[in-house]
Image (cartoon, rainbow, N blue to C red):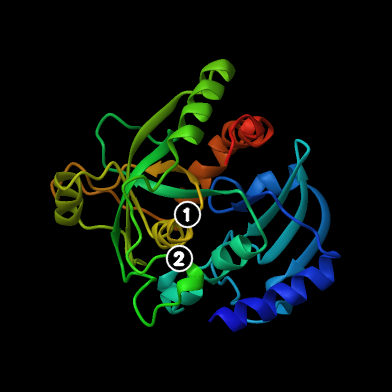
Amino acid sequence: MYEKILTTIDYIKLKTRNFQPEIGIVLGSGLGGLANGITVQHAIPYSDIPNFPVSTVQGHKGQLLFGTIAGRRVVAMQGRFHFYEGYPIETVTFPIRVMMQLGIQFLILSNAAGGLNPDFKVGDIMIITDQIHMMPNPLIGPHDDRFGDRFPDMSEPYDKRLIHLADAIAKEKGIEVQHGVYTATTGPTYETPAECRYFRIIGTDAIGMSTTPEVIVARQGKLPVFGLSIISDMGNIYGEDHPVIITHEEVIKAVNAVEPKLITLITELIRRSSEIKF
């Protein structure tokens, strides 16, 4: 895999004239509009990039953007890849390894998630403080020391310094945020009432189908991560007597409604991240 990454890096550097990003962003659900805030210098379709897969999910565009936000150099994935699309888990996380090799200082991830915490409501922004990974681990298989430790520490999957900074920004901007544990399953089915009860019992506040594999790969390389979930529905937290029908269209609608607040928060986080020494 390392050789594939080097091939990909060579192509990207050629196309971007050796652009050196400081921050990596996955413009998942809730951050798609942030692309409009990027002063784009280079945009490369995934289909043109050697060894890159192509996103097949509605609402996920497929290109790598290079430019600036609030004066900071960024590389942004406009659309991510999911295990449920049929890609091997190492393919899903391949772009994260590429961004790390490009030299980013930290990674920003976002997603839409079903709320399982009864104190949450649709439209809430949840800062992710921890995670439960319920799909194949992207580090399974032959180990390459160039990627990091064989058994990486996961005691702090989400960077506390970035969380603290985001909390301060949210308070200043009057943006209400929640905190919680994000659980990722393979999907693509939404959870049954029994599954919702189970995941809540084991400590889940919000549940989705992405993000955690990316975090595992990032943390193997000791890359700091900041993650956000938009609570797009409240799932089947009240059991089979009160079933909730969840559709992808409703999820997208809920995400679009809160996106401006999320973009404000992330833009200011990027601006002020220079306060943190990584």
Query: Which picture quadrant has residue 97?
Result: bottom right
Query: Which residue is at a point 83% across and 72% down the rendered structure image?
Result: 14
Query: Which residue is at a point 70% across and 63% down the rendered structure image?
Result: 64
Is 97 rendered above or below residue 242?
below
Q: Earlier in the sequence, mark 2 or mark 1?
A: 2
CA neighbours of label 2 inside 10 A, class few (<14), some (14 to 19), many (20+): some
Residue located beneath label 1 in the image: 222
The percent coordinates of residue 146 (x first, y second) are: 51, 71
- Could you give the CA–CA distance between mark 2 and mark 1, rounded to whole angstroms? 8 Å
Query: Which residue is at a point 30% across and 59% down the rendered structure image?
Result: 133
Q: Are marks 2 and 1 in contact (CB under 8 Å)?
A: yes
Task: Decide if residue 123 is on the left or right side of residue 186.
Answer: right
Quadrant the C terminus occupies:
top right
The numbered disc on residue 109 is none
CA neighbours of label 1 inside 10 A, class few (<14), some (14 to 19), many (20+): some
The percent coordinates of residue 122 (x first, y second) are: 40, 36
Q: Amino acid at mark 2?
A: Gly
* 44 vs 140, nearest the viewer: 140
Residue located beneath label 2 in the image: 148
Q: Amino acid at mark 1?
A: Lys
Is 86 rendered above or below residue 148?
below
Is 145 rendered above or below residue 124?
below
* 203 vs 261, nearest the viewer: 203
Q: Secondary structure at mark 2?
A: loop
Task: Decide if residue 217 is on the left or right side of residue 20.
Answer: left
- Count of all numbered marks drawn on residues in the image: 2
The percent coordinates of residue 236 (x first, y second) are: 23, 48
Query: Which residue is at a point 36% across and 81% down the rendered structure image?
Result: 141
Q: Secondary structure at mark 1?
A: loop
The percent coordinates of residue 48 (x first, y second) are: 74, 78
Task: Decide if residue 206 is on the left or right side of residue 160.
Answer: left
